[in-house]
Structures are given as structure tokens and as C-alpha cells.
Image: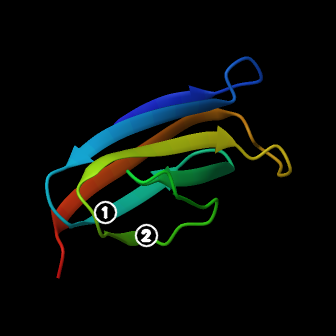
Amino acid sequence: MLEGRLSRDQPGVSYSFTTASAQTLHWHASGPAMRIVLTSPNGEADGPGLPAEISLGMPGKYVLSVSANTMADNAYGAFRMELRLSPRR
């Protein structure tokens, strides 16, 4: 479980994780309007709209970036995010 706060002074935060093999990322977030981008080990980025289940096709370091969606109401505040990795099917 990840918890954070988005504000005008800190409108974004990034989290990294490493996989040793192909995995499936399951995620769920609650809080203000957010933009979420996932960057893979080869530098390719997906987002800001991501499905709740994402196939991670290669091992390596991934970066999940969360930022305030300033084009929406309620862009700032506390958020919670649950991330879970499982073997890829």
C-alpha cells in the first residue's frame, strides 16, 4: 500500500519497482484526480490512462509516476494506491 499527498508544491511523485521475470501488475488508486504513467525498463511510457491489470512483458526496473490532474476538479489531496504483482499468465 502506497500513500501520498499531491499539492501545488508537490504535484507529483514516482515509485519504482523491479521484476525478475514477466509479471502482471494489478493496481487500484483512490484520492484526487490523478494522472498515472508507467515507464518500462526500455524507457517506453504508458498512460496517463492505464487499465487496472497490466502485463509487464520484460524483467527490470519500472517507474510508476502519479501526478495531479490539474485539468480536473479536486486535483490535490491525499491518495492511496495498492500495487500487486503476480506471475504472468
Q: Which residue is mark 1?
A: 25
| In-image side of 85 versus 40 (left or right) | left
Q: Which quadrant is home to the N terminus?
A: top left
SS category of the residue bearing label 2: loop
Q: Residue at x 43, y 43 (%)?
A: 63
Q: CA distance from mark 2 to mark 1?
A: 8 Å
Residue 1 visible in the snapshot: no
Q: Which quadrant is home to the C terminus?
A: bottom left
Q: Which residue is mark 2?
A: 52
Q: Which mark is residue 62?
A: none
Above-or-below relation of 3 to 89: above
| In-image side of 62 versus 51 (left or right) | left
2 and 1 marks in contact (CB < 8 Å):
no
Q: Residue at x 58, y 45 (%)?
A: 31
Q: Badge 2, how many Cα within 10 Å: few under 14, some, many 20+?
A: few
Q: Amino acid at mark 2?
A: Ala
SS category of the residue bearing label 1: strand
Find the residue positioned furthest to the front.
Answer: 42
| In-image side of 22 versus 39 (left or right) | left
What is the x, y in percent for residue 85? 21, 59
Quadrant assignment, res 84:
bottom left
What is the x, y in percent for residue 81? 42, 46
29 vs 15, nearest the viewer: 15
